[in-house]
Image (spheres, rainbow, N blue to C red):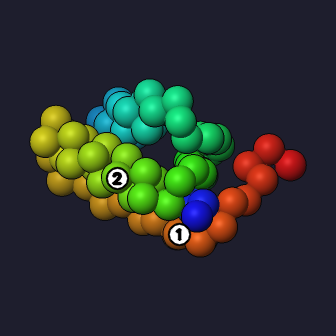
Amino acid sequence: MKLTAEMSLYPIQEDYIPVIQGFIDTVRSHTDLEVVSNAMSTQVCGDYARVFEVVSEALEASTRAFGKQVLVVKFIPWELDLNP
């Protein structure tokens, strides 16, 4: 089963760009997932369990490296076309 997630990360610090970019880079490093970013969010699509696994691991790594942050995610339980 496929899953699409739309994510927005909100670091609780002033220097937020490196935190957001690091999170996106971590998610992008998984070539088995389709990842698209824009000015508002990052979308990731792939195997249901794998998307949850990668999002969880990326948030854990980012929190350990940068501290407090909020991740807002919408999960859509099917595959969306991320490149319309």
Q: Which mark is residue 53?
A: 2
Residue at 44% across / 28% down in the picture? 29
**Residue 46 location, x and y as percent?**
57, 50
Residue at 37% across / 39% down in the picture? 23
The residue tagged with tag 2: helix, strand or loop?
helix
Crowd band around label 1 with a 10 angstrom C-alpha radius: few (<14), some (14–19), many (20+): some
Q: Which mark is residue 84?
A: none
Nearest to viewer (mark 1 / mark 2): 2
State left or right for residue 26 relative to residue 76: left
**Residue 71 location, x and y as percent?**
36, 60
The residue tagged with tag 1: helix, strand or loop?
strand
Residue at 80% across / 44% down in the picture? 83
Q: Which mark is residue 75?
A: 1
**Residue 44 location, x and y as percent?**
56, 49
Report how far apart the C-alphas of labels 1 and 2 lie in the structure: 13 Å
**Residue 67 location, x and y as percent?**
15, 46
Q: Tell me, yes or no, whether the two marked residues, 1 and 2, touch with CB atoms within 8 Å.
A: no
Q: Is residue 16 visible?
A: no
At label 1, the amino acid type is Phe
At label 2, the amino acid type is Glu
Quarter in which the N terminus is drawn: bottom right
Nearer to me, 35 or 8: 35
Sequence order check: which comes first, mark 1 or mark 2? 2
Quadrant of residue 49 within the rendered picture: bottom left
Crowd band around label 2 with a 10 angstrom C-alpha radius: few (<14), some (14–19), many (20+): few
Q: Is residue 84 visible?
A: yes
Q: Is residue 30 above or below residue 59?
A: above
